[in-house]
Image (spheres, rainbow, N blue to C red):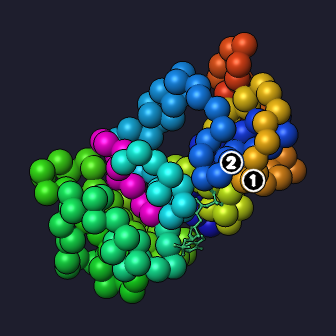
Amino acid sequence: MKHFKAIAAMSLNRVIGDGNKIPWHLPEDFKWFKEKTTGNIAVMGRKTFESLPGVLPNRRMLVLTRHPRVLVRNHPEIFGQFKEWRGGKHLRKPYQMRFTRLDGNPHGDLWVFKSLDLIDPKDFQCEIFICGGAQIYEQALPLCEELFLTVVKREVPGDAFFPPFEDNFELVAELRDTPEFKILHYRRRG
Ligand SMILES: NC(=O)c1ccc[n+]([C@@H]2O[C@H](COP(=O)([O-])OP(=O)(O)OC[C@H]3O[C@@H](n4cnc5c(N)ncnc54)[C@H](OP(=O)(O)O)[C@@H]3O)[C@@H](O)[C@H]2O)c1
């Protein structure tokens, strides 16, 4: 059993994305996401990674794709800021690439994985947050011990949805309640 944490924001009708974008703009919620993930690890699918304006600073990003070389080839504007790091125990695993920043910032590196199974929490000292999108939540929620869920208090059209989780998680705290959203903390039952 892996012990990841998930962090997500969904609308009342369970939408998390539309056209590879998040269909709301809530700076306070972005701030919350930043607070939780800074200094830690953010795991995300290739589509979510491509939806970001750039690499998130001050945290390690783990990107999942079944075609790592294609991802690197398609984004010279991103991978040009990094050098591929070769050697060490992590690279003995197949289909995993690790990039370090050319500017030497140790907190902003980027790892590309071909499979969720290759991510072993024991390899890392800090918290590992599953950050979406829909495909990755679907696969990784069974491996998560905790869920930090922002519920946006509106219904919106969308094409990416948060999977059912209520049977397996119990609410332990309401961390914030604002007119636009609330942040709920869930823990795996049992
Ligand atoms: N509201 C939120 O909290 C939140 C958070 C994150 C994202 N989002 C939204 O979610 C949407 C994106 O979700 P999505 O489901 O379309 O895409 P996604 O989960 O971000 O990425 C899917 C991609 O991840 C790779 N992948 C999936 N499973 C894999 C596995 N087991 N091993 C290796 N690679 C794997 C594949 O990449 P390849 O095709 O390259 O192989 C796949 O196409 C966007 O609208 C985004 O804005 C919302």
Q: Residue at x 75, y 53 (%)?
A: 159
Mark 1 Cα-neighbour bin, 10 Å: few <14, some 14–19, many ≥20 = few
> Is residue 119 on the magenta stretch?
no
Image height check: is 125 above or below 65? above
Is 181 positioned to the left or the right of 13 in the image? Answer: left
Q: Nearer the viewer, residue 50 or 60?
A: 50
For the residues bearing labels 1 and 2, Cβ distance under 8 angstroms: yes
- Identify the image quadrant of the N terminus: bottom right
Side of 146 relative to 96 (left or right): right
Give, as a single range, the part of the protein colored magenta: 55-63
Residue 151, position as x, y percentages in the image: 73, 31
Residue 174: image x %, image y %? 71, 24
Residue type, numbered disc 1 = Asp
> From where the camera sits, is residue 109 visible?
yes
Q: Which residue is mark 1?
A: 159
- Whether the residue carrying mark 1 lies under 8 Å from ligand 1 is answered with yes
Q: Is residue 56 magenta?
A: yes
Classify 187 as above or below 134. above
Q: Quadrant of ligand 1?
A: bottom right
Instruction: Give the camera-side residue of 126 and 52.
Output: 52
Q: Residue at x 18, y 66 (%)?
A: 83
Question: Which residue is under mark 2?
Answer: 18
